[in-house]
Image: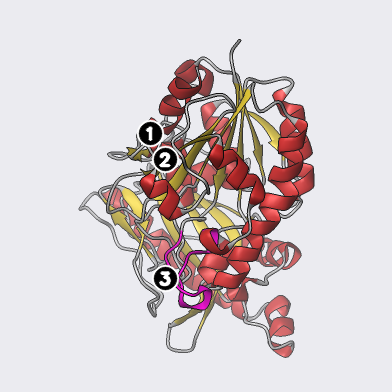
Amino acid sequence: MKKKIIYILLDGVGDRPNSTLNYITPLHAARTPSLDKLARNGQSGLVYTVKKGIAPESDIGVFCMLGYDFTESYVGRGVVEAIGSGLKFQDGYVALRGNFATLGDKNEIIDRRAGRNLTTDEAEDLSKAISEKVSLSYNTDIQFTSTVGHRCILVISVKGQKLSANISNTDPAYKRVHGIVAAVAGDKKFALAKCKPLDKKPQSRLAAELINEFTEKTRKVLGEHPVNAKRRREGKKPANVVLLRDAGDSLAELPTMEEKYGLNFACLLDMPVEKGIAKMTKMQQYSGGSTTDYEYKAKMTADILKRHDAVYVHIKTTDEPGHDGDARLKTKVIEQIDAGFLAPLIQTIDLKKTAFVISADHSTPCSMKGHSDDPVPLLVSLEGMDKDGTCRYTENDARRGSLGTLKGIDVLKTAISLIS
């Protein structure tokens, strides 16, 4: 009988030893009886999700962890999120992921996420004002929308012309590395960057010019907006600039997950980027509810498995404490996921017929407050499979596991071969 698979990626769960936790990682510090039970029934290892030396964003990390090799050429997160948000996109348009952020008087970036307390309603009001009041040169069409919290998407197109995405970010916390956008290492101070063409093509120069025009015009709209006036009165950081990154100008034709693995995959998701990945890989989508509704996610995962061979679950909440540098909170979140999601799920399903594959899309060490190039822990667990003596799901246990160190693109095919 074919085994079913629950494939869980804990966003940014990997970490480094932290002084506030007596120099162990949040995974090590967390009380995780459910993860530990699964670890004792399986084999562990480490994964470079994209490749060694790259601190990836979630989108390309997820694609690679699903088995899609984008290490040489990538469509860009802007395209993925535009598709996931339902915006119109075709080759020759340029799509970018954006953050509503806080900019100081001297162009210094005070907070890349506007305090991480910008509500979705506030962002929608700001987005509506930008859409109504900002127009660009060269008969340019703008599609701009907020998504969740501080996150937003921009798609620009010029009638009768194609644009190139070979341009730099205005968000200096991320840089292009061989076509991949990777996090800049360290907790650094940044200033708003100008968008620059990365080649001499007129399509690139025009795209960069339009991005810079958009940035300046939106700063004026945001600076005068009532939402930000209210936020200042309340002592909150204003969302007075849009930082843009991860440009893309073309779609990609991808094999479906079923074509790759012979399994009918579904996914449980929360964020626009996940919706885009699901659409591009032809996975059936199911809503995961709010990001912290772990019991609902457990119930949905078990229900989805009744109709599908495999379900991919992306859990976002482990990443945010890493960006905030809060190791104690990250530990607490891991414990909440273990108790609220994994514990009821383990009680519901047959562990002899359903395998768990648990890993991450990247590491987000609290000491860095950003993504790193550290490998992430991997666990493949099925009651009755060969075990390697792993007792916990931690970075150190994974380092000693029998799976060794894998590439992200090899994770699922390795897991499937182990449980077959």
Q: Quadrant of residue 274?
A: top right
On the image, numbered disc 1 is attached to which residue? 409
Query: Would you say residue 20 sits in the magenta stretch?
Result: yes
**Residue 165: x percent and y percent?**
36, 48
122 vs 12: above or below: below
Q: Nearer the viewer, mark 1 or mark 2?
A: 1
Name the side, left or right, on which 194 lies relative to 319: left
Task: Say which label, 3 or 2, has the lower sequence index.
Answer: 2
On the image, numbered disc 3 is attached to which residue? 368
Name the side, left or right, on which 326 lies relative to 92: right
- Is any part of residue 158 visible from this angle? no
**Residue 38: x percent and y percent?**
59, 39
Residue type of the residue flagged with mark 3? Met
Count of marks, rendered view: 3
Q: Residue farthest to the left?
A: 200
Spatial distance from mark 3 to mark 2, Cα to Cα?
45 Å
On the image, numbered disc 2 is attached to which residue? 160
The quarter of the rendered structure image containing the N terminus is: top right
Q: Secondary structure at mark 2?
A: loop
Residue type of the residue flagged with mark 2? Gly
Q: Secondary structure at mark 3?
A: loop
Q: Which residues are magenta?
A: 15-27
User: Residue at image x 27%, y 54%?
Assistant: 53
Residue type of the residue flagged with mark 1? Ile
Image coloring type: secondary structure
Task: Say which label, 1 or 3, has the lower sequence index.
Answer: 3
Crowd class of label 3 (few under 14; some 14 to 19; many from 20; radius 10 Å): some
Crowd class of label 1 (few under 14; some 14 to 19; many from 20; radius 10 Å): many
**Residue 155: x percent and y percent?**
51, 49
Q: Main secondary structure of the magenta part?
A: loop
